[in-house]
Amino acid sequence: MPRQRLQKINMKIGIGNDHAALEMKLQIKEFLEEMGHEVVDYGTHTSESCDYPVYGAKVAKAVASGEVEQGILICGTGVGISLAANKVKGIRCVVCSEPYTAKLSKQHNNSNILAFGARVIGIEMAKMIVTEWLNAEFLGGRHQERVDMIMALEEE
Ligand code: RB5
């Protein structure tokens, strides 16, 4: 079967992980680079136990500042690292364990960081989720109004 190609190439994507997801992070990084994307790896770079909020925040700040266009975060479940990322102003980080939610999170919610769990899904599912997410486009319109409502909560 021909390999599925990503439509958008040459994007600058930030990636981050904790110790539970080092191997999957490296595989996803390679997958993205094979597709033509530039990947900025914010760590962690070893399998030594570490604190996932540190890496969630690094990638989230890079996305929020425009240093990278989009972000991918991986920890054991995807939960802790996404919670940390969502504390950074301007971030809409989603945890996905299947591609449908990943695609809709971009189309309807304009998610700017994708998270998943290395202890929850396998590498092939992770690649499929990443592909759907990167290929999806925000649909705007009524969805923009709802996203604006979400972002207005940051000002309260
Ligand atoms: C690390 O043991 C684990 O707590 C972390 O990878 C993640 O699953 C947290 O949400």
Image (cartoon, helix red, strand yellow):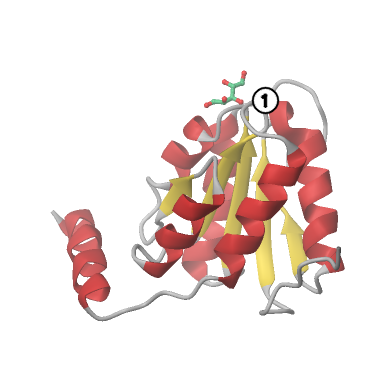
- The location of residue 13, given as percent across then percent down, is 67, 65
Q: Left or right of 80: which side holds 125?
A: right
Dividing the image into 4 quarters, which one contains the N terminus?
bottom right
Q: Left or right of 25: which side holds 57?
A: left
Query: Does dot 1 land on a helix, a strand or a loop?
Result: loop
Name the residue located 51 percent from the left edge and 44 percent from the top edge.
96
Name the residue located 58 percent from the left edge and 32 percent from the top edge.
52
- The location of residue 75, given as percent across then percent down, is 62, 33
Q: Is residue 30 above or below residue 147?
A: above
Name the residue located 52 percent from the left edge and 71 percent from the top edge.
136
Q: Left or right of 13: which side holds 89?
A: left
- The location of residue 144, given as percent across then percent down, is 26, 74
- The location of residue 122, given as percent across then percent down, is 72, 35
Give the quadrant of ligand 1: top right
Q: Left or right of 132: which side holds 30?
A: right
- Dot 1 corresponds to which residue? 50
